[in-house]
Amino acid sequence: MNVTAFWERLSPFQQDLGLFVALLVPALLVGLACVAGYRPYRLVGAMLWRFRWTNLLFVLLIAASVGIGVGLIAQERGLRQGTARAAEKFDLIVAAPGSEMTMLLAAVYLQPADVPLVSGDVFNEIAANPRVAIAAPLAFGDSYEGASVIGTTAQFVTHLSGALGAGRVFETTGEAVAGAAAPLAIGDIFTPAHGHGDGAEADAHAGADYRVVGKMAPTGSPWDRAILVPVEAVWMVHGLAPGHGPEWDGRVGPPFAADAFPGTPAILVRADELWANYALRSEYNRNDVMAFFPGAVLAQLHGLLGDVRQVMSILAIATQMLVTAGVLTGLVVLTRLYAQRLALLRALGAPARFAFAVVWSYAAALIGAGALLGAGLGFGATIWISRIVSARTDILVTASFGWPEAHLLAAFVSVTIALAMLPALAALSRDIVADLRG
């Protein structure tokens, strides 16, 4: 079996672990070669303690470099995973022809948008399709204290949240279900505003009150701050037909009457079989409607942002290269602090290799401490930034220390420790007599 075939048979975990070990092996080999036959550790410890504040500054410099690299890569990955997680429940979106990206932002991430409506005939056609398990209208436009008020069906609430965190699903046009992070509790009564943000008209729907009867379980998406009401209520509060004929008895949800269906910006469609979703997408991509997978559009967006990820990776590597050059230059300067002591060691008969091992071990200790501290600082900063991003976007962004960060850390340590031999060689090239004279 050749090496390529063996590698491909390994699991992803085994491959990542193997790459991590391979990146660390050069550092281990250099270390063994530099200190073989000597024990410079007590002397190195004394050097570290003697100039501890100066050494601490170098450790912090290295930690800052590593922390920036780790933080950039981990944060970018967390954002990609968070946005993908938010779109998981949206199998297929059907909307009027237009921009898929605009509808993705509106339907999945609840960004206000002015889009055309899908007619009742199209909705009933989709709902009657034998492949369709869920067809739920999504009606936007209102808000309450910054939270979007969305008109939909009870079936969509159950699909989005699974079992509710508390309470029950709405059953009448005066009831609502609040997201896990929405500014409402069960039993609260509120009046929605027309529009969003600074342009919202607070008194436009005076008298159109809703009572919260349920709270959704957390979804990790912007829908956690949304407030879901029957779609009939959204239509009626805007002076439109309720979606049902004259014989309507007040019960909310489908079936809807096509001639009394005011229209909806988007329809969530879900089939029980994966192949059926693809068939439905093909069927409803035509002149009067478009159908798309939010996950596919999001993947295209991530692809467009791939250049940003590469720039961030290059920035992290460039930062580490600059810091490595600065650290090595600083180590050369630091060895001058120990020049007289090293010269005394050599004058007393210590081999040049021992002095080399001392200087290299000293540099390696600073590099190792800085790398470990930087990994911790980078991970901590990423957690803090993730919380801010989650609060601002309502998308759950979780930070994690993954294999890419471990690989970056291992590569940095190996390269820097190998280059640390340069300050050690520079220390040996100094004139012993001149150093003894000070």
Image: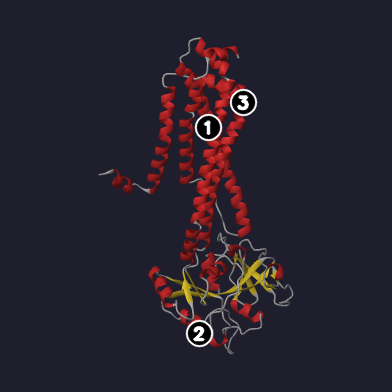
Lower sequence index among marks 3 and 2: 3
Gap in Å between the C-alphas at discs 3 and 2? Answer: 77 Å
Q: Residue at x 53, y 16 (%)?
A: 431
Label 3 sits on residue: 52
N-terminal of the two: label 2 or label 1? 2
Which numbered disc flags the more N-terminal residue, 1 or 3?
A: 3
Q: Which residue is mark 2?
A: 121
Q: Is residue 87 above or below residue 407?
A: below
Regarding mark 2 in the picture, which secondary structure is present there? Answer: helix
- Count residues near mark 3 (Cα–Cα under 10 Å), then give few for <14, some for 14-19, many for 20+: few
Task: State the residue in front, 248 or 295.
Answer: 295
Residue at horizontal 61 percent and vertical 59 percent from the top: 393
Of the residues shown, which amino acid type is indicated by label 3? Arg
Mark 1 and mark 2 in contact (Cβ < 8 Å)? no
Look at the picture and state if 67 lies above or below 95.
above
The residue singled out by tag 1 in the image is 367
Expressed as whole percent of the image width and height from the top left, the position of residue 185 reads 67, 64
Other-residue count near label 1 (Cα within 10 Å), few / some / many at <14 / 14–19 / ≥20: many
Separation (CA) of disc 1 from disc 3? 14 Å
Q: Residue at x 57, y 37 (%)?
A: 63
Name the image quarter holding the N terminus.
Answer: top left
In this picture, residue 146 sits left or right of residue 162: right
Count how many numbered circles sit on residues in the image.
Answer: 3
From this viewpoint, which residue is outermost toward the bottom?
A: 246
Q: Label 1 is placed on what type of residue?
A: Ile
3 vs 2, front mark: 3
Residue 411 percent coordinates (x, y): 46, 39
Specify whether residue 92 is in view: yes
Q: Amino acid at mark 2?
A: Asp
Q: Quadrant of the C terminus?
A: top right
Quarter of image, res 177: bottom right
